[in-house]
Image (cartoon, rainbow, N blue to C red):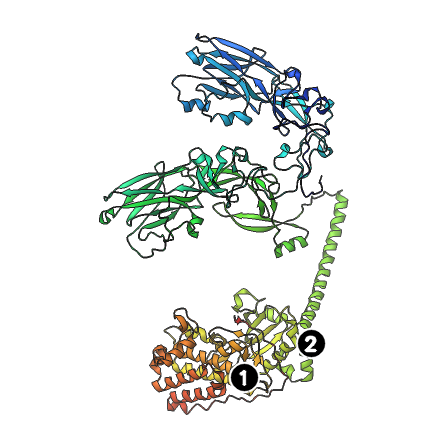
Amino acid sequence: MSFSHSTSPAVAKYAKAGCNDTCGNDVKIPFPFGIGADCAVNEWYIVECNNSTPYLSAALNRPEVLGVNLEDQTVIVSMPKFYGCQNPVPNSSKTMSMNLGESPFFFSKSHNKFVFEGCGTATMMMDGETVLTGCSTVCGNATHNYVNKCYGIGCCQIAIPRYLRSYNINITGLGEEDAACGSAFLVDQTNLYDQQIRSSDPYFYRNASFIPVSLLWTLTDSDQITCCRYYYPAKRKVDVFSGTQVETFKCVLEYEGVLEDGDLDHYNPYLVDGCTRYVPTTMYARRGCKDTCGNNVRIPYPFGIGVDCSANEWYIVDCIYSTPYLSALNQLEVLGVNLENQTVTVGTPMITDCQNPFRNSSEIMGVDLGGSPFFFSKPHNKFVFQGSCGTAALMTDNGSVVTGCSTTCRSIDRKNCFGMDDCCETTVPFYFKSYSINILNGSLEEKGGGCGSGFLVDGTSYHQRTWFSDRPFIFKNKSFVPVSLLWTLDQVTCCYYAIEDKRVKGDMIDGTTVDTRECRSPSYPLEGNPYLMYGCTYKDEPEPTEECRRCKDKGGSCDMKNMYDVDDLPSARNFVCYYPYHEKKTSLGVILGVSISMGVLFLVAFSYVMYKWIKKAKEKRQKKRFFKRNGGLLLKQQEEADPSLVDKTIHFTSRELQKATDNFNENRILGRGGQGTVYKGMLVDGRIVAVKKSKLVDESQLEHFINEVVILSQINHRNVVKLLGCCLETEVPVLVSEFIPNGTLYDQLHNETDEFPISLDMRLQIATEVAGAIAYLHSATSIPIYHRDVKTTNILLDEKYRAKVSDFGTSRFVSIDQTHLTTLVKGTFGYLDPEYFQSSQFTEKSDVYSFGVVLAELLTGEKPISLTRFGENRSLATHFMLAMEEGRVMSIFDAVVIKEGTRDDLLILANLTMRCLNLNGKHRPTMKEVAIELETIRRSHIPPMVQSNIGLATYAEELSMPTFGESSSTFLSFNESIDQ
């Protein structure tokens, strides 16, 4: 059953319409009790309000009503106390009786205790003969503290076994002077007695004539009770001493959101309109209690400011001058409470000990948590020792070593507490209640004595440096440090969105475990306090993951579960998919079963055939759709306009490429880039190829993309990687190019081995070939191409170590009359033209600058960006130019280059590099000029007998190229680049 939401709870209703619900200022009288005959369910429940004091039915001799608990179905009344003062004669006794008659009330067994104060024995009997229960005391030289506990020395207590309507009490005294006077009584244990035995008066009720007693009240069919929201009352059984059971009716509201925290203290389920659904809100303290002390510290339940606001006496917080203190732990200051980790951070004293100048040890006490429900937290605290160097500190618990650390006299890092100089730290391996610190001095003799401080400290505060002095890891001049305590509970009442869970928090040093009950959310994060029934709400539900969406698409439901680490701390949250469970139904008969089986087999076979046919047709349609989306129709139009393109642009099928790459096997991956993955493949004719599979496609650029594929497939330069063809019938375009086996120039330069270093001749050859290829792209093709990402990782080396310029992913085509391109800045740091970086205008001279960086790499063997160089020198270009300006360029050249080259040749190469790196692009040479100069230098370096076999390189190679229109699209890139 569900109820409509309301923005706020309804006005509390406790009594019948037209009846008062309070007597005086404090005592609330809810229905079925009532002030007056017309306001109570029957005559036994009539309450008289005389002089602002409520009294129950005259049939019970009008006991005073102290309170009514609707949830426990009890009424607390004031009953007379039975005294027995004996003559000093041993074993004399006295008896009294108490009887509730035929009333609907019983003495509650779960809420009362039988207590005897005095010396002797007190028994509770039935009908003056049958003993129900009893307890005995001893007296003598008992200390005040033992008497206070009421566990047998001058005072004893015991539970009663059944619900009772009557009983007799018999006291037998010991006859020992004043102790012969005693008193015995039933008392409500949950309301008063357990809280008051801590009083300074060991016999708290000795001077009282009346004591609070809990009576269970019962209702019958004749009372015609209807619960709130028209729920039917539930039947309950009451076990009485005679062995019989008495039936009673009780309004139990175990339905969603009917009552708020505080439960029946605020609403009455015994009235049709006595309760309403409460809208959950974010709360931290009990209703009517403050949740903060001062401006900063929040005090959430189970802690509370005051006795009535906490779970028990251990969790009472005193707010003194806007500062919270934990009352039961010697007024330790509360710095914060973490409900999720179940910890409270308190300020504990720092333990300091000053030693004599002798090698000795000194044990100093720590903090003892005693019988409290608190433990020093293992995962949240650190043990820190600060003092003289050469000193060790051990933390012990009852003689067992918990942890420890030591310092050495080496001032290596005074900004960290790693055991150097005078500070060390370590983790805490156990949960524990108390500790001592033992300081072992090693080198104080030489230093003339010293002072040491050992302490536990909360790890978060320690690493955030929130409590530290000018030396960030030391608590100098501090008398208190923050420490995290695990707080434990035996029972909890959780908020509606949380669940109660029993968790084992960890191990104690003695081998036992720390167990507690906690309230936690099984799914989404909560706001507020899960330890209050209606104190928390869900945070905004996070965006579901892709797995969750697929789960819902399949008819499942998604939830989110907490993941915990080894220390039982929340570490992550994962979505989980749940599917509905369908019960299997048995067949109606053997014949029907066989018929259905045959039909199912036929249907399965038919379905399989249809599935294969539909799948094949679907794949065919999908390939056509991909082919069209990836620009296949545009490519067909280009081929129809120029039939010669058919032989030059190869169309690979998806099946061919899947076979070539073993279904794009992970083991075939050559590399991954920002826009795709490169696989090694082998075609059916045995050719080894590189297959580049892009990650995404820009449909607005398809026309330019196809135009570029056509143009690049026709470039036939010996130093440019050949584009063999493409596949457009896959989800993303796939490009196929020739495979270059010896990797990149970058790998050869920076990962070379002593077995095969790159000689100066090889470097000159590579530089000349790369310059020729770029010059060819700039001036020899029908449409100039700017590479825009010239770098050593885009220069491949074939089996004969000939250079191949690759990866035109950021290249641009320009019309002949254009001098520059204005684009978003793309490229790789270390190679970017500063002029292009500032103006976003890319010219052919920008490729010249990048090539200048490649030349510098070849000459120096250093990386374009290096963290081993400092300041401006981290950039190789700047490093090279500064060395030239300072006349020390030879000092940065690679050892192989220095060994094999002449000074004149190397200076010529250095000057050429400087010209390429000129910050003003107009003063840089063209790539054609660079290529010619490099060829000249190379020829001058090669011995004459070898020169005769080498002809002058030609950079404008013969190539039949059709003229295409202007294109500004980008090719697919497979290397990481920097976009700005």
Mark 2 residue element:
helix
**Amino acid at the residue labelled 1:** Leu
Amino acid on which disc 2 is placed:
Leu
* Callout 2 crowding tier (Cα within 10 Å): few <14, some 14–19, many ≥20: some
Please state the horizontal and vertical placement of residue 315, each as a whole percent of the image: 50, 36
Nearer the viewer's eye, disc 2 or disc 1? 1
Q: Image height check: is 266 above or below 173? A: below
Q: Could you tell me if residue 288 is visible in this image?
A: yes
The extreme bottom residue here reads: 948
Kindly report the distance in space between the C-alpha atoms of the residues bearing marks 2 and 1: 28 Å
- Which quarter of the picture shows residue 222? top right
Viewer-side residue, 278 vs 690: 278
* In the rendered image, the vertical position of residue 204 relative to residue 472, given as above or below: above
Helix or strand or loop: what does disc 1 sit on?
Answer: helix
How far across and how far down the image is residue 568, in percent?
A: 49, 45
Residue 151's place in the image compared with 571, above or below, is above
Q: Is residue 561 left or right of residue 271?
A: left
Expressed as whole percent of the image width and height from the top left, the position of residue 682 reads 55, 73
> In the orientation shown, which residue stands out farthest toward the front?
51
Asked whether 526 or 562 is in front, the reply is: 526
Q: Quadrant of the N terminus?
A: top right
Residue 740 or residue 638, whichever sits in front: 638
Label 1 neighbour load within 10 Å: few <14, some 14-19, many 20+: many
Please, is residue 192 above or below residue 704 in the view?
A: above
User: Which label was assigned to residue 571?
Assistant: none
The numbered mark, 2 or 1, whose residue comes first in the sequence reads 2
Which residue lies under the disc numbered 2?
Answer: 633
Do the residues bearing badges 2 and 1 touch, measured as CB atoms within 8 Å?
no
Q: Dot 1 corresponds to which residue? A: 777
In percent of width and height, residue 352 lies at 33, 43
What residue appears at the point 59 percent right and 37 percent down from the top-left corner? 287
